[in-house]
Amino acid sequence: WFEVVNLLQERNLLPPGPVTPPTPCLPQDLQKINCHPEVFRSTLTSIPQTQSLLNKAKLPLGLLLHPFKDLSQLPVVTSSTIVRCRSCRTYINPFVTFLDQRRWKCNLCYRVNDVPEEFMYNPVSRSYGEPHKRPEVQNATLEFIAPSEYMLRPPQPAVYLIVLDVSHNAVETGYLDIVCQSLLENINALPGDSRTKIGFITFDSTIHFYNLQEGLSQPQMLIVSDIEDIFLPTPDSLLVNLNECKELVQDLLKSLPQMFGKTMETQCALGPALQAAFKLLSATGGRVSVFQTQLPSLGVGALKSREDPNQRASAKDIQHLSPATDFYKKLALDCSGQQVAVDLFLLSSQYCDLASLGCISRYSAGSVYYYPSYHQQHNPAGVECFQKDLKRYLTRKIGFEAVMRIRCSKGLSIHTFHGNFFVRSTDLLSLPNVNPDAGFAVQMSIEENLVDMQSVSFQAALLYTSSKGERRIRVHTMCLPVVNSLSDIFAGADVQAITCLLASMAVDRSVTASLSDAREAMTNASIDSLTSFRTSVLTIQQPGLLAPACLRLFPLYILALLKQKAFRMGTSTRLDDRVFAMCQLKYQPLVYVMLMIHPALYRVDDLTDEGALNISERTIPQPRVQQLSVEKLSRDGAFLMDAGSVIYLWIGRNCNPNFLTQVLGLPNYAANMLPELDTAESQRTRAFVGWLREQRPFFPILHVIRDESPLKASFLQNMIEDRTESALSYYEFLLHVQQQISK
């Protein structure tokens, strides 16, 4: 049974707080130990028995995964034998069946396996003969410390290579000071052990290496000017042990910003610099952090501007979403083969062709960071954001030489993967580096009928080397019920997971077909599923646009996607901004993607302690979420919009003077900072903003929006429910959907 909502009549659909994922209909004991939805979830929490039933529902089937998420309580098991199914290699988990003390049945392939002798002893309770009480069978997420058979070679050390653009353009932005400063401050917090290695390359029209060998009185710069044929001038002293050579490294970081202060070099040979980085790291593997500020102009991988501003607003379709050259992809695949990942920091005020450059990170399992119009003087908010992101980046957990495999119950198959990686064999993702902020998605199909099965399971296993040189395996297992009626499928639909999977599919569609194809496919996804619901599930036909309660936000989220930077038409969205939004939709975990798609709006000039959270001695107000429509803004109020990577504080023209003085400390009010005032209102507002920021691994800038603010347009662009020059209002969109359904 489920509630049916008429979307044309129900105007207040948003819950007051976060949207909660549906709970799978499983027996209580299984439900309790199932994998946490922030780590592993499915678009459908009830799996259809057959592919034809799935086709009828018109909803996508897939999994969303945040496998290396920072977890506060992660059970770690050290054992000389890791118990796995003899046939399909599934790790023993809470959803297996014990036939008796000595035999267990795999929940993926149903093979009966023997329980090894040492599994009979439980190290936690120190008792014998209760294998079902071991941590492996009590936890849906856990980590094994792997024995030697899980290593192809001795675990690699943590290796970090910093590659810096030092052309005139780069030096002018002032980013070098920030990077060197941040490295100096965090050098002792870089994850690693006594074997950690570090190296530096700088580049303009030539490539510069730095000899940091122990015993030198100062770092020695070595220049390679033949960029057509890159070689390493002194192969053994360019990557050095961080502990042994720390002073030289610190000397280099202190002198780098001045070294190029007066440079007149405008050219930039990024491709050759990346080739040099690959040569330097291919023996060990490791992480390359590249800082780039312009279009690469020299040597392999040089690019020409493909952006025509006149095309932006008028074009029916957006060109140049795919790479201009396959150089970056090919090099990324070479990197992946040698366990090297490349992270790209793009700090630029003009077009940089992220569609081409992004490939270096995408296929090597790196990350892309993008700071448009970055400048130390003209954009202080951008500088603060870069500083905070860099600190997190340098100090967050990292896994080296990783692979991830996703297994599922017999009858199901996984076919398309989304995220940053290289698919090594049909189901093995190669991740030279894995980081705690990376998300993945997969699409699935039902190959054989699941007729005699009550439930199915999915297991993701991530094998990696920790920064301390340990081989570890992190395993997540999820169990879901199998159903044979359309109404059960609809009742268990996870609207946010569906939206995120469709967003990833739409990015692929934009690149392989066209943006208009992708937009049409998203619109049709909402029309088709609601048509199926109306014709096949509802017994009584009644007027209106009817949706099951769990999908009531589906058309709203689809409209939000159509207005998202990645997919919107008509407005003058810069090409790099669009491509970056597409990258983020594909590799951010679900919780952050949802804020990018549908920001959260709160009224904040009347915050109270009613219903507040208490977290470590602090009171965090919990205002209700408002609809994204201008009619919700009142001139005498202040509203906070959390759009994931940016937070806007909109101040109404007649805003309550109390708020202005108690929170913003007017008249001497600084543009993008909340001053620390000793008032209850200031404390509440700062506690709320601080709490929002703490919930994510990147740092959202706060912009204060007044009537004359240049950012007012971007704030209003997020008002999804309102009409814009090129897009329907929410109500118009609902009418369009209803019209298509009743055709």
Image: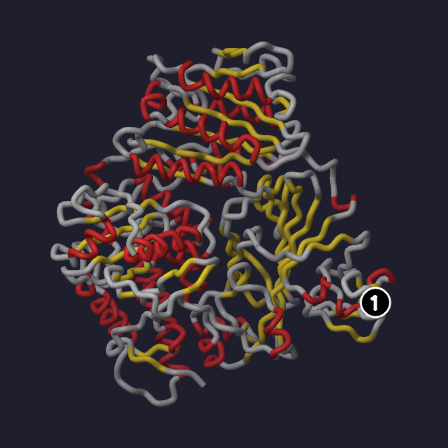
Mark 1 — residue? 127
Residue 240 sits in quarter: top right
Looking at the image, can residue 110 be seen? Answer: yes
Residue 17, compared with residue 707, is above or below; it is below
- The total of numbered circles placed on residues is 1
Name the quadrant containing residue 371. Answer: top left
Query: Looking at this view, is 382 or 728 the one in front?
Result: 382
Visible residue check, residue 596: no
* In the image: residue 165, left or right of residue 125: left
- Residue depicted at 33% across the width and 27% down the height: 304
Q: Residue lying furthest front in this view?
A: 678
Render colour scheme:
secondary structure
Residue in the image at 45% along x and 63% along y:
497
Q: Residue 394 location, x and y as percent? A: 51, 36
Q: In this rendering, would 662 be left or right of 613?
A: left
Q: Residue at x 73, y 55 (%)?
A: 77
**Which one is nearer the viewer's eye here, 306 or 155?**
155
Q: Is residue 556 above or below residue 48?
A: above
Q: Residue 276's spot in the image, x, y percent? A: 54, 22
Q: Residues within 10 Å of mark 1 (few under 14, many from 20)?
A: few
Q: Position of residue 348 (x, y in %)?
A: 33, 31
- Badge 1 amino acid: Ser
Image coordinates of residue 701 in percent, x first then y, are 33, 45
For image coordinates 35% across by 62% down, the residue present is 621
